[in-house]
Amino acid sequence: MSDDKDAKRYEIIGYLATGCTNKEAAQKAGVSLSTIQRLKRKADFKQELSMAVNSVYRSVLTQLTSGIGKAVKELLPSIESPDTPDRVKLKAIEILLTQAANANDLALEQRISEMEKQFDQIKQTIRSRNAVSETDTRSIGFEFGTDEWKP
């Protein structure tokens, strides 16, 4: 693949990983929608896009976590101050608890995303080695030739 094609491929991955639709990514990258659709059918592109999405997700999660810490530092004095009205304290506590729950949800989503990535890598390894039959593949939880989880 030429350097120009590599650059265009990574540009498309960047657009898709940051939330652009296929149509938006095609318009921004100056390619056709069918080019985006064709690329998304390729295993190596899917893997690169998945890694980029995970990277963006981790970056956003880090920023959110940092922001939560700053918010807590700002809200704690309001909660602890005897001069703060009770309704303001309650609202501050509500905000803190909501943010803590959101952070927990984000961490859980990240762990699930990482597990899905590892599972995809296992599937690719199995498929590339042709180490198991179609029946054996189904027994570990996915249909051979598909990306669907079938518990």
Image (cartoon, helix red, strand yellow):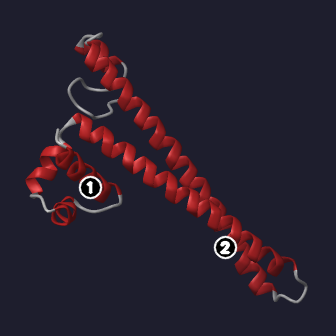
Q: Give the vertical position of 132 relative to 97 (above or below).
A: above
Q: Position of residue 44 (x, y in %)?
A: 25, 35
Q: Residue at x 29, y 10 (%)?
A: 132
Which corner quadrant of the image does residue 80 belong to? bottom right
How many neighbours does mark 1 have within 10 angstroms: few (below 14), some (14-19), or many (20 or more)? some
Left/right placement of residue 94 relative to residue 52 reads: right
Q: Residue at x 40, y 30 (%)?
A: 119
Residue nearest the observer in this picture, 63 or 147: 63
User: Could you tell which of marks 1 and 2 lies nearer the N-terminus?
Assistant: 1
Left/right placement of residue 38 relative to residue 100 reads: left
Q: Quadrant of the C terminus?
A: top left
Q: Position of residue 127 (x, y in %)?
A: 27, 19
Q: Give the vertical position of 107 relative to 68 (above or below).
A: above
Helix, strand or loop under label 1: helix
Residue under circle 1? Answer: 11
Residue nearest the observer in this picture, 27 or 134: 27
Q: CA distance from mark 1 to mark 2?
A: 38 Å
Residue nearest the observer in this picture, 97 or 103: 103
Q: Position of residue 63 (x, y in %)?
A: 57, 62
Residue nearest the observer in this picture, 129 or 7: 7
Helix, strand or loop under label 2: helix
How many neighbours does mark 2 have within 10 angstroms: few (below 14), some (14-19), or many (20 or more)? some
Residue under circle 2? Answer: 95
Which corner quadrant of the image does residue 121 belong to? top left
Q: Residue at x 17, y 42 (%)?
A: 2
Left/right placement of residue 145 relative to residue 48 reads: left
